[in-house]
Image: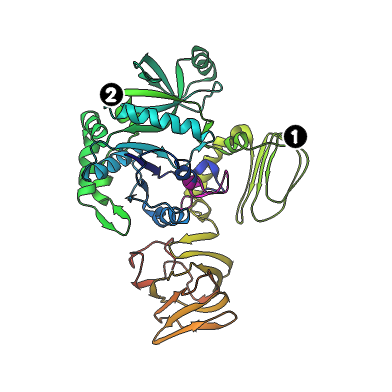
Amino acid sequence: MIIPVILSGGSGSRLWPMSRELNPKQFLSLYGEQTMLQETMTRLEGVPELAEPVIVCNEEHRFLVAQQMQDIGVVVDKIILEPVGRNTAPAICAAAEYIQSKKNSAEDVMLVLSADHVIKNTQAFHKVITEGYAIAQQGQLVTFGIVPQKAETGYGYIKRDGKLEGREAWKVAQFVEKPDQVTAQTYLDSGEYYWNSGMFMFQAQNIIQELDHYAHDIVAAVHQAVLHGGSDLDFCRLNVDDFTASPSDSIDYAVMEKTDKAVVLPLDAQWNDVGAWSALWEINEQDSDGNVLHGDVLTVDLSNSYVHAEERMIAVVGMDNCVVVETADAVLVADKTRAQEVKEIVNQLKEGKREEALLHQRVYRPWGSYETLVEMERFKVKRIIVNPGAQLSLQMHHHRAEHWVVVKGTAKILCGEKDFVMTEDQSNYIPLGTQHRLENPGVIPLEIIEIQTGSYLGEDDIVRFEDTYGRTDVHSCLDSK
């Protein structure tokens, strides 16, 4: 069987302000109707001998992953939760440890994919997967090398060596770092180099064996993290202390650059890793002026630009080669050739401890979402949406009272000793210090307006007594409701 292993731990900071730390690019619909994670899964439809996927993600993203897979009808084998980021080698090692622990997994092949790539030619992609499956079953470590279309300086390269007999694949001669323009052109002209895609195929036992040989400390730490970890719902929780003890390294540096089992399989399938706004301009259809426009956009004398409006109308006059992206709480304006430098803005936001680096005004929770509409010194107004059949934790607040107004749907409410149902246009008051819970017993989303009043309205003023989703009463300001 081919077991998809989807790495979904990136932060996508170069695609700010759309991509935020708690809702990064892989969970957004940046290209097509589905999110990038969903696209990664659905493009595998039709691959023979495909098993249920294993997804490795950040602890904070666990419910986003679960919900997005449920939305497209994908049954997940396991979602492995990283307590801290440790790059791709420990993440792949954790997935391999889990797969190897299952019975009858010796012949299975891991197909390691990033959750945030675009691949337009699905047929060519499937063909390469089939070829890689056969090679990986022979004990080789396969990496997909993207056939370069231009002298690109933003990617690392793989140089091929001797061709495998009877296969459209080559032994790997070497991995090389991102080159300058002149060097990249020589790579392109030689025909011997491919872009490093970060996609792989190998058997779990083989990658663990090679990791143990070249990066023993990673295997030792991750093995303990899996052994001492826990499991609930569809989640495998890696032990925090053990996983934190692992060195942080990419699978390229840890193994692929050192092993003699590395094989590169050329892939020509209109691939893009969507690393910056300029990449989205490249892969989207452009109008006669070379522009890609999304949302309510008006232009005069605009060319070769990417403009994305989320909440408001954007008007752009007399500009060329630019990026303009608008969200509810931020606007980005950049020279398209310097789109990679957006990451520096995110670093400034983090240094200033600003929430715009972490989350949007709409925040997703396992039960639904909320967004803050108005916030003043002693009151806050939120719009809360609860998914059908979902419920918030049983909780109370020390410093604030809440008033709920049902706008749409049906709410089942526990307030102190009272248990009752509210429908549209009805309201209820939750006094300070009162245990309460909100639930949606209906079949359509429940929408309520919440008005908070009190001396302190921080999201950390919450004590949980019961929670369907396994959250504790030890939480951060990001754990609202």
Q: Residue furthest bottom?
A: 417
* Residue 82 can be seen in this image: no
Name the quadrant of the C terminus.
bottom left
Tell me residue 396's x, y (percent). Answer: 40, 76
Left or right of 223 on screen, residue 284? right
Residue occupying image coordinates x 37% and y 41%: 50
28 falls in the magenta region: yes
| Looking at the image, residue 279 lies above or below residue 382 | above
Dot 2 lies on which element? loop
Mark number, residue 471: none
350 falls in the magenta region: no
Tell me residue 475's x, y (percent). Answer: 37, 63
Magenta residues: mostly which secondary structure?
Answer: loop
Tell me residue 306's x, y (percent). Answer: 66, 40
Rounded to the nearest whole Å, what is the CA distance between mark 2 and mark 1?
49 Å
| Residue annotated with mark 1 | 288
Query: In the image, what residue type sits under mark 2?
Result: Thr
Q: Are marks 2 and 1 in contact (CB under 8 Å)?
A: no
Residue occupying image coordinates x 28% and y 34%: 203
Q: Which of 434/204 is in front? A: 204
Q: Around disc 1, counting alpha carbons within 10 Å, would you say few (fewer than 14), some (14 to 19), or many (20 or more)?
A: few
Query: In the image, what residue type sits under mark 1?
Result: Ser
Dot 1 lies on which element? loop
Q: Which of 172/309 is in front? A: 172
Q: Quadrant of residue 468?
A: bottom left
| Residue annotated with mark 2 | 259
Which residues are drawn in magenta?
20-38
Left or right of 444 on screen, residue 461? left
Q: Around disc 2, counting alpha carbons within 10 Å, would you say few (fewer than 14), some (14 to 19), or many (20 or more)?
A: some
